[in-house]
Image: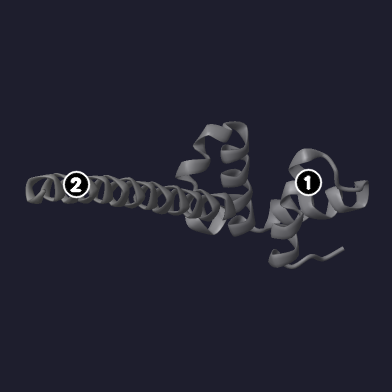
Amino acid sequence: MNLNCEIVMDLIALYQDGLASPSTKTAVAAHLAHCPSCSREYALYRKYCKNPTRLRNIPSEYAPKENFLRLANRIRHRRMLLRIGMISYVCASFCMILLMARMKNRLI
């Protein structure tokens, strides 16, 4: 079976985890033995799979999780800014009410 590089890249996770069928394992192993670029990609995949704490340092082409983490941080940051804005609004409103009450007491 002759596989192209794109198919092998799709099958690397199954191959690494031992979930691929025997014929797929054989075909991927044969392709990796003859294709230096796919072998390099496979070595990188294995490197990052051994230590999941490295997921933050994965190059962007390997990291849909990196995009998710970036998005989660943006959402967290926006929520924090929204909370700060709401607290500021409530404090400013409270100060205005106190100031108005104080001025009303002076007029009477």
Q: Nearer the viewer, residue 6 or 98?
A: 98
10 Å crowding of disc 2: few (<14), some (14-19), many (20+): few
Q: Which residue matches tag 1?
A: 15
Outermost residue toward the right in this view: 22
* Tag shown at residue 100: none
Q: Earlier in the sequence, mark 2 or mark 1?
A: 1
Q: Give 62 or 79, whichever is nearer the viewer.
A: 79
* Callout 2 secondary element: helix
Rendered residue at 51%/48% (across/down): 69
Query: Left or right: 35 with respect to 85?
Result: right
Q: Quadrant of residue 49?
A: top right
The mark total stands at 2
Q: Position of residue 48 (x, y in %)?
A: 57, 40
Amino acid type, residue under disc 2 in the picture: Ala
Amino acid type indicated by mark 1: Tyr
Instruction: Residue under label 2, please give it.
Output: 101
Q: Residues within 10 Å of mark 1 (few under 14, many from 20)?
A: many
